[in-house]
Image (cartoon, helix red, strand yellow):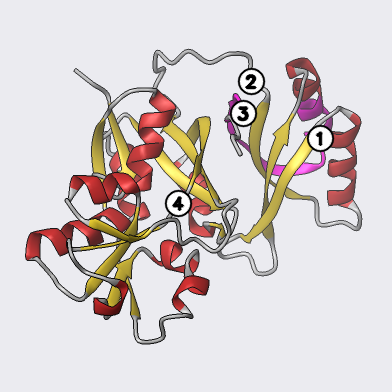
Amino acid sequence: MKDRIAIQGFQGSFHEIAAFKFFNKAVDTYECDTFQKLFDGIAKKKARYAICAIENTVAGSILPNYARLREYDLEIFGEVYLRIEMNLMALKGQTINDIEEVHSHPMAILQCTEYFRKYPHIQLVESNDTALSAQEIKEHHIKGRGALGSQRAAELFGLDIVAPSIETNKRNFTRFLALKRREDNAPIEIDIPNKASLSFRSQHQPGSLAKILTIMGNHGMNLTKIMSLPVLGMEWVYFFYCDLEFDSYDAYQHMKTAIADLVIDLAILGEYKQGEKVL
C-alpha cells in the first residue's frame, strides 16, 4: 500500500506535480482545498507525509504556513523546487477574445497580472486551486471562462491552452517542503543533512540577534533566509525563522550549542538535504 501524501490542491495541481518530483514516482494523494486542511490532515494521520508550498520567487513567502510549522510541530525532511509555468486554458475552440473571466488560485493570479493588463475586459476571480478551476470548466462546459494552471491540468481535463507560459517572471519557482509527523520514524533514506530550518526568539537585549547571526557566520553557516512573525499574545515579540545551508554537519551541531544561551524557544523545524535548483 502506498503512503498517502497530503497536498494543497487536486489532480493536476502544482502540489501534485511537486509530490511526483520529490518522491520520484506517482503517489497516492490526500487532496486538500486549503493549507489548513493539509496541516490538519497530516496531524490527524489521514496522510503520512505532506508536500506544502512555503515560498515563491515572485509572490514571496506564504506566511501562515511558517506559523503552522511550529503550531503543528511537524518535521521538514526535504524540499523540492518547481519551475512554475502558468498556462491560460479554456474549452476547445475558445480564444482570448471569448474569455470574460479567469479563475485560479490567488498566488497564480498574482504571478500573471502583467499579462492581463493587455486584456482589461477579463475579470480575474480567485479560487481555491488552479487544477480545480480547470476541472470546473470541463465538467460544466463553461464557455467564456479560462483557468490558469499546469500543462498537466490542461491535458487531464481536455482543455486548450489559449496562451502558454504567461507568468510575468520566467524565473518563477515555488519551493515546497516535505513534511511528516515528528514522532513518525518513517523509512526515508536521508543523506547527511546540509540544510536546516530553525525558529527561535532572541533575548530582549540590544544586539542579541546580531550576536546569534555572527555565531552562525563564524561556524560556516550560509543564512539563506530570515524572517519574523509575531508571537500571539505577546505584543511586539517575534519568532525568527531561519534557513541555513552548511558544508559540515559537525559545524552545524557546534553552532546550535553556541547559540543555546542566546535564544528562547529554539525549534529545529527540520534538518535535510538541499533541493536541486534547476534554472
Mark 1 or mark 2, which is nearer the start of the sequence?
Answer: 2
Q: Is residue 67 magenta?
A: no
Q: Where residue 134 sits in the image (x, y, percent)?
A: 23, 59
What's the distance in space between the residues labelled 3 and 4, CA to CA? 22 Å
The C terminus appears in which quarter of the rendering? top right
**Residue at horizontal 65%, vertical 31%?**
196
User: Circle 4 is placed at which residue position?
Assistant: 85
Q: Is residue 259 magenta?
A: yes
In the rendered view, does 268 fall on the left or right side of 216?
A: left
Secondary structure of the residue carrying tag 4 is loop
Where 9 sits versus 118, above or below?
above
- Of the residues shown, which amino acid type is indicated by label 3? Gln
User: Circle 3 is placed at which residue position?
Assistant: 274
Secondary structure of the residue carrying tag 2 is loop
Where 264 sits versus 253, above or below?
below
**Residue at horizontal 43%, vertical 16%?**
188
Magenta region, residue range? 255-275
Q: Are marks 1 and 4 in contact (CB under 8 Å)?
A: no
User: Circle 1 is placed at which residue position?
Assistant: 259
Residue situated in front as seen by the camera: 238 or 161: 161
Q: Where residue 78 sits in the image (x, y, percent)?
A: 52, 29
Residue situated in front as seen by the camera: 9 or 26: 26
Q: Where residue 3 sits in the image (x, y, percent)?
A: 27, 24
Q: Are marks 3 and 4 in contact (CB under 8 Å)?
A: no
